Image: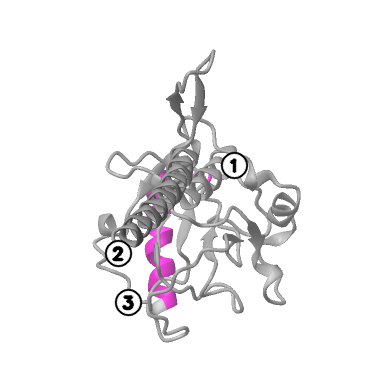
Amino acid sequence: MQLIKRSEFGWGASGASTARPTRGLVIHYDGSDQNLAGKPHASCVDYWRRTRKFHMGSNRGWADIGYSWGACPHGKVFEGRGLDRIQAAQPGGNADWYSVTLMSGPGEKPTAAQIEAVRGLRAWLMSKGVAGAVKGHRDFYSTSCPGDSLYRLVRDGTFTKGPSGSQAIEEDDDMDVNAFWHDARIKMNKGEDAESERSPAAFLQELETEQDRTQQRLDRIEAKQDEILAKLGALGK
């Protein structure tokens, strides 16, 4: 999946307040059909620009486009407010949930590429420490959004499936340290007949436990030493 950052639209950092959404991702759609699936991808770019202009215009007066992300019918994810920003998309969940709009309307169904784009976005957010939950806009506020078609996909778990290999977002410079810490394995051989494996977290726990045992033995030795010295001192009197 291709992630198109806001800088590619000539936009600077979002003017929205900072936040730390960690609870999951909320699905949205537009209030009217956009019919972008049958148009060139440039139409999706125009749509994203228009949406931001409308959200920041006199009718809304928001600090930025209302959504964290947008998923276009061609399978690309557009950065809106992006990471670590409060939303203007779902009252009641703006500070602790991210949002994604599928650039479609009530009479449209998402494309397969669009669904995969959302799955890829969800997986990427999970690598950033965000929970994997997916909800619809109507779960927070009395609204028809994201429409019956998309909301069925929210409820039946379509968006919570893992992305295909070609849709996963890859970041060359970022290692998911948490995933490595819990999922990686270190081969161990402590005189056992066969090698065993430990995760780095489990391996560190074993080391800490052994360190505590060693310290306890040293404390006992030191106490015994003090006892012997006290006896020797008594004999010398």
SS category of the residue bearing label 2: loop
* Magenta stretch: includes residue 114: no
How many residues crowd mark 1 within 10 Å: few (<14), some (14–19), many (20+)? some
Q: Identify residue for label 1.
A: 111
Look at the picture and state if 88 lies above or below 152: below
- 199 vs 4, left or right, is right
Q: Residue at x 45, y 24 (%)?
A: 188
How many residues crowd mark 3 within 10 Å: few (<14), some (14–19), many (20+)? few
How many residues crowd mark 2 within 10 Å: few (<14), some (14–19), many (20+)? few
Look at the picture and state if 6 lies above or below 87: above
Between tags 2 and 1, which lies in front? Answer: 2
- 108 vs 8, left or right, is right
- 235 vs 213, left or right, is left
Q: Residue at x 54, y 13 (%)?
A: 193
Q: CA distance from mark 2 to mark 3?
A: 81 Å
- Name the foreground residue: 64 vs 87: 87
Residue 173 appears anywhere in the view: yes
Give the image location of residue 134, x and y in percent. Answer: 63, 56
Amino acid type of the residue tagged 3 in the rendering? Gly
Q: Identify residue for label 2.
A: 237
Q: CA distance from mark 2 to mark 1?
A: 94 Å
Q: Quarter-wise, where is residue 13 in the image?
A: bottom left
Amino acid type of the residue tagged 1 in the rendering? Thr
SS category of the residue bearing label 3: loop
Give the image location of residue 19, x and y in percent. Answer: 43, 73
Where does the N terminus fall, quadrant-wise?
Answer: top left
Name the chief secondary structure element in magenta: helix
Indicate which disc, 2 or 3, sits on the residue closer to the N terminus. Answer: 3
Q: Identify residue for label 3.
A: 15
Where does the C terminus fall, quadrant-wise?
Answer: bottom left
Specify start and end residues of the magenta stretch as a single range: 37-55
Furthest residue toward top = 193
